Amino acid sequence: MKKTSLNDIAQQLGVSKTLVSLVLNGKAREHRISAEVCKRVEKLAKELNYKPNQIAKGLRTGQTNTIGLMIADIANPFFGKLGREIEKEAASHGYRVIFCSSDENAENSREQIELLQQGQVDGFIIAPPAGSENQILSLKKNRTPFVLIDRHFPDIETNYIVVDNVQASYEAVTHLINKGYRKIACVTLNVHLNNMNQRVLGYKQALIDNNIPVDEELIKMMPFSHEKNDVVFAVKQLFEENNRKANAVFFATSKLGIMGIETIHSLGLTIPDDVAVVSFDDPDAYKISQPPISAIAQPLQEIGRESIKVLLALMNNNKANTEVQKIVLKSKFIPRKSSDSLFL
């Protein structure tokens, strides 16, 4: 079906294409176009299901009412749900969101950002991969409106919305300690990202504050690729029957957690009787798992709301919001049966 154009509307009404454009772009009053003509144009545009060409509109006005959202891993349930919250919040302000995934690869991120810039997005919300500092510095130098989410670069002064990863991990591991566990492992990602580093820091600090020595052999660093064989190998090292090194585990991401839990079951171990489990992030799978998994739930709706709020202020050059916004939100630890103790 042929897409309705401004010219189609103009021909049916017997008016000029320019007049139709002025009406549909909200400029009728300043050009003294009558209310009666406006009603006729708007009524026919609606009947013909007219949709404006956003690229052409962007060339005329410098704005496309679109936001580029760069997430780290589209297969990760956390980023999928967060993207949905950002999309809903953006829509409530009249903006569309274009999604991209870097797969935690700096080169992918650079290419995606350049592609979005060619599409003339009005601003960016970015979960930056390790090694993308120069991209962020370039956006900052060019005064491109952007806000970072989930992680940031401490040495670069930028707007960001993150959670308190140290406190969240500290609370989850302290929960295990209070339940009687002492041999607590940590399975995390071997990436140079401050959010992952902070989660390991919170894990270690909870042990130290409870007079439990930090055993580096219980900390397993996984490549970002999340290759299942790597996770299986690490979990087997921790929990195999002949060499049981730990009786509880903290997974630093839900993607690691899902693969790790599957491996624990494959070893014939029972959660929590043999192994207690807590995890960062709270995907729906954790709620219906048997047993349900204790998890750190991030405030996705609040992250979405704050990221759009900060970005809109930047895009609108709101002088009241010229100060860099460094927003750190609290997560919520949700204890479930996966960390019930046999010791108490």
Image (tube, helix red, strand yellow):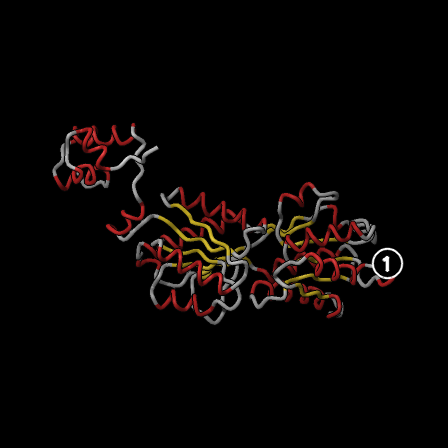
Outermost residue, bottom side: 155
The answer to whether one can see residue 174 in this image is no
Which amino acid type is shown beneath numbered disc 1? Glu
Please state if 125 lies on the left or on the right of 36 as rendered: right
Q: Residue at x 31, y 46 (%)?
A: 54
- Image quadrant occupied by the N terminus: top left
The answer to whether one can see residue 21 in this image is yes
Q: Residue at x 56, y 66 (%)?
A: 193
Residue 114 image point, x, y percent: 40, 60
Q: Which residue is mark 1?
A: 241
Crowding near pointer 1: few (<14 within 10 Å), some, many (20+)? few
Q: Residue at x 43, y 45 (%)?
A: 89
| Helix, strand or loop status at disc 1 | helix
Residue 198 image point, x, y percent: 60, 65
Outermost residue, left side: 32
Number of numbered discs present? 1
Residue 303 image point, x, y percent: 49, 51
Please state if 175 lies on the left or on the right of 164 as rendered: right
- Rendered image quadrant of residue 41: top left
Query: Depth check: 328 or 192 in front?
Result: 192
Query: Depth check: 142 or 314 in front?
Result: 142
Query: Depth check: 13 or 283 in front?
Result: 13
